[in-house]
Image: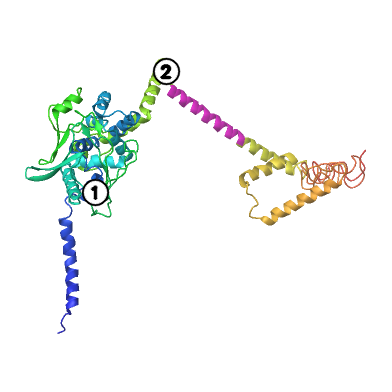
Amino acid sequence: MRSLHPASGVRWFSLLLLPLLLLLGALHGPAHAAEGEFRDEELDQILAPIALYPDSLLSQVLMASTYPADVTAAAAWSKAHPDVKGDAAISQVADQPWEPAVQSLTAFPQVLAMMDARPGDVQNLGDAFLADPGRVMDRIQSLRSRAQQSGNLQSNSQQVVSTSDEGGRQSIVIEPAQPQQVYVPVYQPSVVYGAWPYPAYPPVYWPPPAYYYPGAAFAAGFVWGAAVVGINNALWGGFGWGGRNVNINVNRFNSIHTSRTISNGNFNFNPDRRGHVPYRDAGSRARFGGDRQFASAQDRQNFRGKDGRQAQRDRAAQQLKARGADPVAGRQRLQGADRERASKAARNTGRSNFAGATAGKRGAGGAGGAGGAGGAARADNFKQARHDNALSGVRNSGASRANANRGRTSLASSAQHPKFSGASARGGGGRAASGGMRAGGGTRAAGGTRAAVAPRASGGGGMRAGGGMHGGGHMGGGRHR
């Protein structure tokens, strides 16, 4: 019996093992592969430009990102008031309908400017946070740990970096060095995090707005810019790293948002301020969606102004109907009358064409002989109306050229006669032909229109000769006086 070669045995073993590995991978795949949810590498890509913000500011950015429409509106307001910052900015937008987390970001106009430049990333950030806040917080800690291990995350004059132990979890905490002065860092994620482990998902970079970071120059991958001052109660958010949740400082919140006071420190999402922005994952749609699909369509209609215009039209129609005028019925009667007139015109046109054709047939074979000019012409037109079009004769190029040559010959002949020089041809033989006064078949005969002989001529044509107006020489064969 022939033994199996060792290399062949390894190959066969690999072929048998591969399906088993694929099956195990399918059964124990990524924990977050549900419909609409982000993978870890996607979350790291989205969070990279903000994961090193101070905790309080970062938590409020996450909450605000769940309201993309409000962020856009707040960014527009901030752009119109670029020098209003800190608590003063929040006081000026207190009457705006935006959620408090969005209002709080007007204290940091440079943050709103960067968010406004990346609306797709903002929406993804909010979707990820709504779907699973704890998982987002885990990815933030992973990024911070990577930056710290690369030697790029440490305390300085702008921030304090420390470590906390909550519920057996080691977490990296970032706070402003001075509570009333907050620096918003801008950094190169590809530098501060070291070697990026996901080449297919490079980290997102939010460039610094020139107005707030004039002459920006990176030092160790960071740009700090000027501090935002006047911060007393504008920062009221925070993280419970041990419990993997977002906390709100109730006293600070109520001090700055006096018309929207709260009694507990939990973040409660308000679906009514979502606008027409859909939810990414099925879980968020189930928890917050409700009639979201209907509301979205309704919001779009209202935005376009259709509901208002339709309501005005409906009210006008009701008023007219109350006065005895029904605009709908009136339109229907007008439309019916228009259709009847069009139908009657079409019937009359058909009868006229048919009558002309019949008369032409009678003229062609009646007392007028072979001509019957009026009726015959209408009969021919009646036939041609059904069979001819603008491209008639295109396929018979020889016939077309022959007709053209005959026309040119007739024109040349008529041009030689002094009386009819320059006249246009109206029939197969031009304006002048041999024969009677009306000879040879022009428009009213088979030849020309008027002949080149005198009205009283002797000989073979007579006054109305050879195919004249009524055809066949109505007066011919002798001398007519």
Is residue 294 rendered to the left or right of residue 433?
Answer: left
Q: Are marks 1 and 2 in contact (CB under 8 Å)?
A: no
- Within the image, what quadrant is residue 100 found in? top left
Quarter the N terminus occupies = bottom left
**Most extreme residue toward the bottom, as rendered?**
1
Q: Is residue 340 magenta?
A: yes
In front: 27, or 173?
173
- The secondary structure type at the circle numbered 1 is helix
Q: Residue furthest left?
A: 168
Q: Position of residue 120 (x, y in %)?
A: 30, 42
Horizontal side of 289 relative to 445 (left or right) equals left
Q: Amino acid at mark 2?
A: Leu
Which numbered disc covers residue 192? 1
Task: Give the mark nearest the N terminus, 1 or 2.
Answer: 1
Q: Quadrant of the C terminus?
A: top right
Residue under pointer 2: 320
Taking the spot 67% from the left edge, 38% from the top edge, the residue there is 356
Q: Secondary structure at mark 2?
A: helix
- Taking 409 as reference, is 268 above or below it? above
CA separation in Å, label 1 and label 2: 71 Å
- Left or right: residue 198 versus residue 470 is left
Kind of residue sitting beneath label 1: Val
The label on residue 472 is none
The quarter of the picture where residue 77 lies is: top left
Instruction: Read off the magenta span.
Output: 327-349
How far from the left and from the top, in percent, is residue 305?
37, 28
Q: Magenta stretch mostly in which secondary structure? A: helix
Q: Is residue 433 at all visible to an observer of this figure?
A: no
Which is nearer the eye, 58 or 437? 58
Q: Is residue 199 left or right of residue 462?
A: left
Q: What percent of the width, then of the height, locates residue 409?
A: 79, 51
What percent of the width, then of the height, locates residue 440?
Answer: 81, 46
